[in-house]
Amino acid sequence: MKTIAEMKSMDQAMQNYVPEKVEPLEEKDMQWFRDAKFGMFIHWGVYSMLGKGEWVLFNERLNVKEYESLADDFYAAGYDPREWAKTAKAAGMKYMVLTTRHHDGFCLFDSKHSRFNAVNSAARRDLVREYVQACRDEGLKVGFYYSPMDWRFPGYFMPELYWDSAMEMKKQCWAQLEELMTGYGKIDLLWFDGEW
């Protein structure tokens, strides 16, 4: 928990905060997406085991440590990106987007910046790598969904009180994005969520 002095210094830090400047893509770089018009968006993760949607950790106010233990039984049964990609192509879709990590923090990829991932689960494999290969085999554009927030960090909910946690979550986010954008070849679409 922050002390009064730390809270005052955080207020000062927030006053001086300048967000990262990101240049928009050029029209030509977005044209393929406008032309594609039809793609498959897949929400899939450890939350799938509970059958209550991707917000189950938050909505049911589950204990984070107990929720993380779901990974011990996460065998990725039913995970079939090859079939999904074939179905997408047969339906006329041009791209797919997979949830690489949702707000619960579980990574479908081999993250070196969080042990809460598919490789450390019972599945013991990089599910994102399988998905990327399936998309490419079917000639589909590859999209990644990634949530910058992580409900396992108290700093997401109360950054004023848990500033160190909030900064650790941000550090993890940047590191995982680097993993995703450098470890799988060209990624055509990066879809963010959780910035509210």
Image: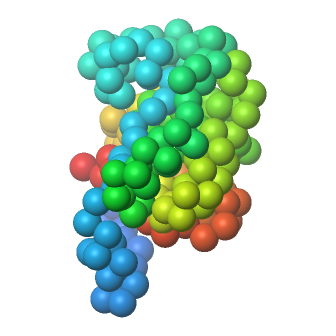
User: What x and y, as percent, mark residue 178?
Assistant: 63, 62
Q: Residue furthest front?
A: 90
The correct choice, above or below, for 187 with respect to 26 in the image is above
User: Can residue 142 be seen by looking at this rendering?
Assistant: yes
Q: Residue at x 33, y 35 (%)?
A: 157
Which quadrant is the N terminus positioned in? top left
Examine the image and state in which quarter residue 99 appears. Answer: top left
User: What x and y, as percent, mark residue 31?
Assistant: 32, 82
Q: Residue at x 42, y 60 (%)?
A: 95
Q: 47 and 67: which one is in front?
A: 47
The correct choice, above or below, for 136 with respect to 3 in the image is below
User: What x and y, as percent, mark residue 113?
Assistant: 68, 44
Q: 136 and 24: which one is in front?
A: 136
Q: 109 and 116: which one is in front?
A: 109
The correct choice, above or below, for 15 with respect to 55 in the image is below
User: Can residue 149 be seen by looking at this rendering?
Assistant: no
Q: Residue at x 60, y 50 (%)?
A: 134
Q: 17 and 57: which one is in front?
A: 57
**Count of picture labels:** 0
Q: Residue at x 54, y 23 (%)?
A: 78
Q: How is the image coloured?
A: rainbow
User: What x and y, as percent, mark residue 53?
Assistant: 32, 23
Is residue 61 toward the left or the right of residue 138 in the image? left
Is residue 166 toward the left or the right of residue 117 in the image? left
